[in-house]
Image (tube, grey):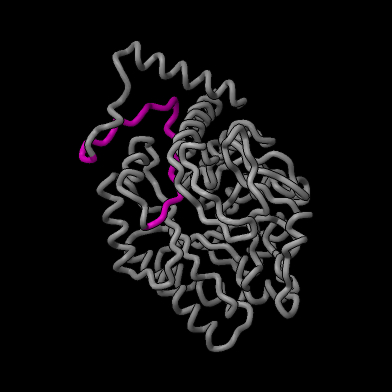
Amino acid sequence: MKRLDFIKTNLAALGGALLAGGLPAIAAPVSAPLASRSTPRQAAIKLGMRVSPGLSDQHLELMRQLELGWCRLDVHERDFSYEDLARTQERYAKHGLRIFSVFNNTHKSPSLLLGGPEREAHLEVLARGIKDLGRLGIPVCDTAWLGLLPGSQVFDTSYADLSGIRTRIFDTAEYAKIDKVAGRRWSAEEVRDALKYCLDRIMPVAQASGVRVAIHPDDPPIPEQGGVARILHSFEHFRQLFDLCRSPNLGVNFCVGTWIEPGEATGKPVNDMIRWLAANGRLIDVHFRNIRGMLPRFQETFIDNGDCDLQEVMNTLVEVGFDGLLVPDHVPVFTIDQTPPPPPGTTYRTPFPPAGVAYSAAGMRTMLRNACRHVET
């Protein structure tokens, strides 16, 4: 859907609501949930947003008002305990929000590549975290097999300015100026062997706990960073992953933006990859974002005006019966929400800019309604 069409569609909906006597009570108290908007066909997709434990009640209330009823919780604290998670879950529930998945950055440890007693201790922490999810009824542990060594994940090289709206840029030429190899290089075989070692120990715990583990593709999808090979950014890579570990609880946190960043180098177009993952029971949750350009240089943009037709992607998700979490992932940061950006080359931290979240939520809901109509015809 073109951005102008999207704006026209939502303005028409706004006008209709006003003529009918007003909009839903966006200032409704927490105890009064908003009435769900009807869709032409009941879709199983769970719309949500990436959040952090420290998100304010105002932000949580905004999610409720936008009908983003599900959360992907990003945890960066290494001492985040079962009690911390339970308190967070309880606080979110007061706003009508449920946690679908937890991404715990404590998985990023050099020990996972270097081995030794520290690796076993680290894997025990990961296993305990997965057990905690099972105890609390949180069905998914999101993870990513990258950034394990210091300097081995650089997410952006600069920021784009779209009429004052800030989005991410990655440029391989600029990245080459800051890339640093610490000591030695790690081959794809070594990195894959280390991943197998970890999965062999973690996945039995996940199965026993009733938790699925969803792995995010490499972002950016380049051969290596910081001397560490990247092994999860093509169809062949994921086919190899599921040969390494056949646990039914292992799947993919599929990022649409990441998949289109390298173009044809993935070996399977985005909609075909979605169909393949769904057919094999591996599509767990989806990041819904768009870009302009592709490697060696791309920039993120609005979901409705990038190079990928995300309406077609949404159609595919509905067609395959996807019933997992769909989040906009990174959202554009409008001027009203801007704070000084982190310096280029630092590890990305997902913000919660309200204007960008609201824009993306409206876009996803419009595309979902259109997809339901498309499948019916």
Q: Is residue 37 left or right of residue 166?
A: left
Splitting the image into 4 quarters, where does residue 54 fall?
Answer: bottom left
Residue at x-position 45% and y-position 73%: 205
Splitting the image into 4 quarters, where does residue 62 fall?
Answer: top left
Most prominent secondary structure in the magenta stretch?
loop
Picture quarter with the C terminus:
top right
Does residue 140 sit above or below 300 in this rendering? Answer: below
- The residue closer to the viewer here, 5 or 236, is 5
Residue at x-position 43% and y-position 19%: 13
Does residue 112 sit above or below 158 in this rendering? Answer: below
- The residue closer to the viewer here, 226 or 2, is 226
Residue at x-position 37% and y-position 43%: 69
- Is residue 48 part of the magenta span, yes or no? yes
* Residue 359 percent across, percent down from the top left: 48, 33
- Is residue 338 part of the magenta span, yes or no? no
- The residue closer to the viewer here, 32 or 168, is 168
Q: Is residue 363 left or right of residue 133?
A: right
Picture quarter with the N terminus:
top right
* Residue 93 percent across, percent down from the top left: 28, 50
* Residue 261 percent across, percent down from the top left: 70, 47
Q: Is residue 39 left or right of residue 227?
A: left
Residue at x-position 46% and y-position 43%: 353
Q: Is residue 263 left or right of residue 61?
A: right
Q: Which residues are magenta?
A: 30-53
- The residue closer to the viewer here, 82 or 158, is 158
Instruction: Find the residue positioned furthest to the bottom.
Output: 117
